[in-house]
Amino acid sequence: MKFSDFVAVDAIRSDVEADTKQGVIREMAEALVEAGKIAPGELEGIVKAIMKREDLGSTGIGRGVAVPHTKHPSVDRLVGTVAVSRKGIDFESLDGEPVHLFFLLVSPPDRPGDHLRALENISRQLRDDGFCRRLKASATPADIEHLLEEADSHGIVT
Amino acid sequence: MTTCLDAMSQPTISREVVVGIQQGLHARPADLLAREARKWQSRIELVAKTQRVDGKSILDVLTLAAEAGTRLVVEATGPDAQEAIEAIGGLFDRNFNEQSNDKETDS
């Protein structure tokens, strides 16, 4: 699976304002609403479900990266977005480091395979230090979009 | 790479496991697995059909995208290989303590 298969480019944010875990999750979910990927009436339920998942264990997987996610019946295909925080956010990460790079995923409950393949793609790219560095240094959403396109075309995506 | 007995006489012990979790080896079980693997001195690797990854790295484990029913081999090499294999095999045997019913946020 490629980034272009699930990342809503209109919802990409290169400089989130939020400085809390819940704040950044809400900001990213709102971006998905603005991009028309999730219904406005579902926003609160989705934010709540993502926070509930975080309670089971932080999705801050280390290296300054978090992958907040949930399943939700209101989406009929996997949707996601990418955000960068300049200052870094305390996400109770596994390694205790502040998180700068966020990949938020909302998937239909009956498509666990798609969710796994999105996680696979994200993890594969994140193992590349160059990718992390460039993502963190992206000044605009368009920069992020280009970087994702590049990863899709040159990366070892299966 | 696949020396069964190197100069330090550190054995490689392996065990086949099956991903029993309905949702596959997603973020939470991958985290549990990497966490458990890091408790041991031994090198821990997961071997799938087309790749071999470091069991102590959640990013590596996630790149397996192992769906329900996938067979993997867990390999441990080092002084505590036996204990490590038992502990990690146990996680798979217990389905990483996940309920089989599909809760909304249990992903």
Image (spheres, rainbow, N blue to C red):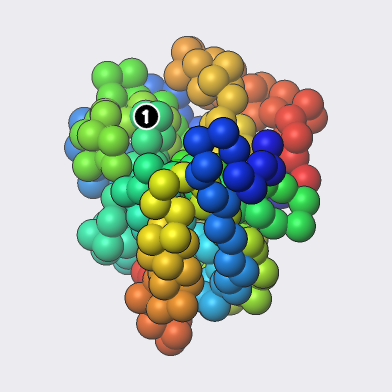
Q: Quadrant of residue B98?
A: bottom left
Q: Picture coordinates of residue B38 (x, y %)?
A: 36, 45
Residue sitting nearer the eye, B25 or A100: B25
Residue at the image position 43 percent from the left and 86 percent from the top: B101
Residue sitting nearer the eye, B30 or A149: B30
Q: Looking at the image, which residue sits at the far bottom?
A: B101
Q: Residues within 10 Å of mark 1 (few under 14, many from 20)?
A: many
Q: Picture coordinates of residue A149 (x, y %)?
A: 71, 28
Count of numbered marks: 1
In the picture, measured across the screen, residue A88 lies left or right of residue A115, that is: left
Q: Say above or below: B59 vs B20.
A: above
Residue at the image position 59 percent from the left and 38 percent from the top: B6
Can residue A144 be seen here? yes
Q: Which residue is mark 1?
A: A64
The quarter of the rendered structure image containing the C terminus of chain A is: top right
Residue sitting nearer the eye, A83 or B107: B107
Question: Mark 1 falls on what kind of element?
Answer: loop
Q: Picture coordinates of residue A46 (x, y %)?
A: 36, 61
Residue at the image position 58 percent from the left and 66 percent from the top: B15
Q: Say above or below: A3 vs B91.
A: above
In the picture, measured across the screen, residue A20 lies left or right of residue B7, that is: left
Q: Picture coordinates of residue A22 (x, y %)?
A: 23, 46
Residue at the image position 50 percent from the left and 16 percent from the top: A133
Q: Say above or below: A64 vs A130.
A: below
The chain to which mark 1 is attached is: A
Can residue A6 be seen here? no
The amino acid marked with disc number 1 is Gly
Q: Say above or below: B17 vs A148.
A: below
